Image (tube, rainbow, N blue to C red):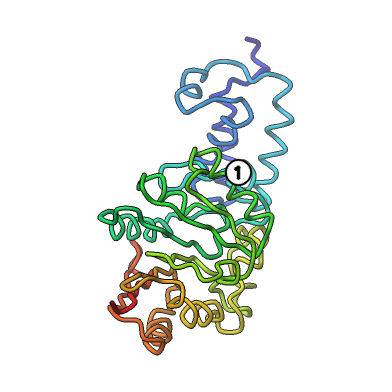
C-alpha cells in the first residue's frame, strides 16, 4: 500500500475528527457508520479492514456523505435506516426517525398484551411502523393495523413489515386518525402523534427542523390538537378494558391527563423517560 493511500482505519478516524471539530455529537459512531455504509462492511468487517486501503472509487462517495453530515443531516437520514428495538427500519422523507424514547411505548405494549391470547393493536400516525412492528415481532399471536395520513409513510411501513417478515399480521390504512378504521375495536391503541407547538418548531435542533417531515412534528398552536382528537374518539375503537398508550412532550402530561379524564378514561398514568421527563401517558376504558 502506498503511503499516499489512506487506510480504512485512518479514513474513519479522520472523518471522526472532522465531525468532532464541527461539534457533531457521537462523531466516532457516525464516522464508523458512514464508512461501513459506503464500503459495505459490518462492525466486525470494519475492525478487520483497518489496514486495508480505501478503494479509489469509494472516496468521492464517502466524501459526499460526510458533507451531508457536516451540513447537519442526521446519519439515519443519510443511510435511510435506523435501528429501533433491535430491528432495522428503513426511512423515507415522509417518516420520522425512530427515537429511543419511543421504545417505552413498545415496552408497555408488550407487557400489557403478553397475556392476551390474540391481541389486536392500532398504531395511529405510524410513520415507519416501528412501534407496531416491534410489538408484533415480540408477540407472535398479535396482529395490528397502522394508520397514517401520508401514503408515502404507509408505503414505507408496509415495506418494513415485509422486510421483517411480519406482513401477514400487519395492515396499512391510509387516512386521518380513526377515519380508516370504520367500526373496528382493538385491545390497544398506541400513538406517537405530532406534539410540537407550531411556533416552537423553529427552535428545534437543525437535524429535526430541517430534515424531519413537518406533518409529523406540528401538533397545532399548543401541540395538543392530535390528543384532543384521539382522546375524543379512541373509546369507540377500544374494547371494554382496552388501553390507550400515547407518547407526549415533556410538559404535556397534566394536560393530556385532563383530556383523557374528561372523556371517561380511567387508570390514567404518566411515565417518565430515562432523562426524567414525562414521556408516555397510558389510560384504560372502564370494563
Circle 1 packing at 10 Å, graded few (<14), some (14-19), many (20+), is some
Q: Residue furthest top?
A: 1
Q: How many marks?
A: 1
Residue at left offset 44%, top offset 68%: 185
Instruction: Indicate the position of residue 188 as horizontal and vertical percent values.
Output: 39, 65
36 or 268, nearer to the observer: 268
Residue at left offset 53%, top offset 73%: 195
Compared to residue 264, the image places residue 27 above or below, namely above
Q: Residue furthest left?
A: 115
Label 1 sits on a secondary structure element that is: helix
Q: Give the image quarter of residue 251.
A: bottom left
Q: Give the image quarter of residue 146.
A: bottom right
Compared to residue 140, the image places residue 239 above or below, namely below
Instruction: Give the side of residue 262 with respect to residue 233, left or right.
Output: left
Instruction: Give the side of residue 154 with respect to residue 252, left or right.
Output: right
Instruction: Indicate the position of residue 276 as horizontal and vertical percent values.
Output: 33, 68
Quarter of the picture containing the C terminus is: bottom left
Q: Residue furthest bottom?
A: 262
Residue at left offset 34%, top offset 75%: 283
Instruction: Indicate the position of residue 257 as horizontal and vertical percent values.
Output: 38, 82
Instruction: Give the side of residue 62 with respect to residue 146, left or right.
Output: right
Q: Which residue is mark 1?
A: 159
Quarter of the picture containing the N terminus is: top right
Instruction: Indicate the position of residue 277 as horizontal and vertical percent values.
Output: 37, 70
Compared to residue 262, the image places residue 109 above or below, namely above
Residue at left offset 61%, top offset 73%: 218
Amino acid at each position: 500500500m502506498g503511503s499516499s493511500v489512506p487506510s480504512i482505519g485512518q479514513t474513519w478516524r479522520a472523518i471522526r475528527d472532522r465531525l468532532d471539530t464541527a461539534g457533531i455529537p457521537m462523531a466516532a459512531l457516525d464516522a464508523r457508520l458512514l464508512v461501513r455504509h459506503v464500503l459495505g462492511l459490518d462492525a466486525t468487517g470494519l475492525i478487520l479492514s483497518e489496514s486495508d486501503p480505501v478503494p479509489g472509487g469509494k472516496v468521492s462517495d464517502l466524501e459526499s456523505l460526510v458533507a451531508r453530515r457536516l451540513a447537519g443531516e442526521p446519519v439515519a437520514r443519510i443511510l435511510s435506516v435506523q435501528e429501533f428495538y433491535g430491528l432495522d427500519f428503513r426511512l423515507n422523507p415522509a417518516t420520522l426517525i425512530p427515537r429511543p424514547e419511543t421504545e417505552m411505548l413498545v415496552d408497555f405494549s408488550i407487557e400489557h398484551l403478553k397475556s392476551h391470547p390474540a391481541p389486536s393493536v392500532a398504531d395511529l400516525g405510524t410513520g415507519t411502523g416501528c412501534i407496531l412492528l416491534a410489538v408484533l415481532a415480540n408477540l407472535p399471536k398479535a396482529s395490528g393495523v397502522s394508520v397514517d395520513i401520508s401514503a408515502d409513510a404507509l408505503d414505507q411501513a408496509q415495506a418494513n413489515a415485509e422486510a421483517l417478515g411480519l406482513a401477514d399480521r400487519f395492515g396499512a390504512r391510509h387516512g386521518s386518525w380513526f377515519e380508516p378504521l370504520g367500526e373496528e375495536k382493538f385491545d390497544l391503541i398506541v400513538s406517537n402523534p405530532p406534539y410540537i407547538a407550531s411556533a416552537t418548531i423553529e427552535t428545534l435542533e437543525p437535524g429535526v427542523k430541517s430534515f424531519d417531515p413537518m406533518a409529523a412534528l406540528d401538533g397545532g398552536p399548543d401541540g395538543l390538537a392530535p390528543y384532543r382528537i384521539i382522546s375524543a374518539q379512541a373509546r369507540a375503537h377500544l374494547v371494554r378494558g382496552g388501553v390507550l398508550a400515547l407518547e407526549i412532550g415533556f410538559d404535556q402530561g397534566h394536560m393530556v391527563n385532563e383530556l383523557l379524564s374528561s372523556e371517561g378514561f380511567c387508570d390514567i398514568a404518566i411515565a417518565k423517560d430515562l432523562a426524567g421527563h414525562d414521556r408516555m401517558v397510558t389510560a384504560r376504558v372502564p370494563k
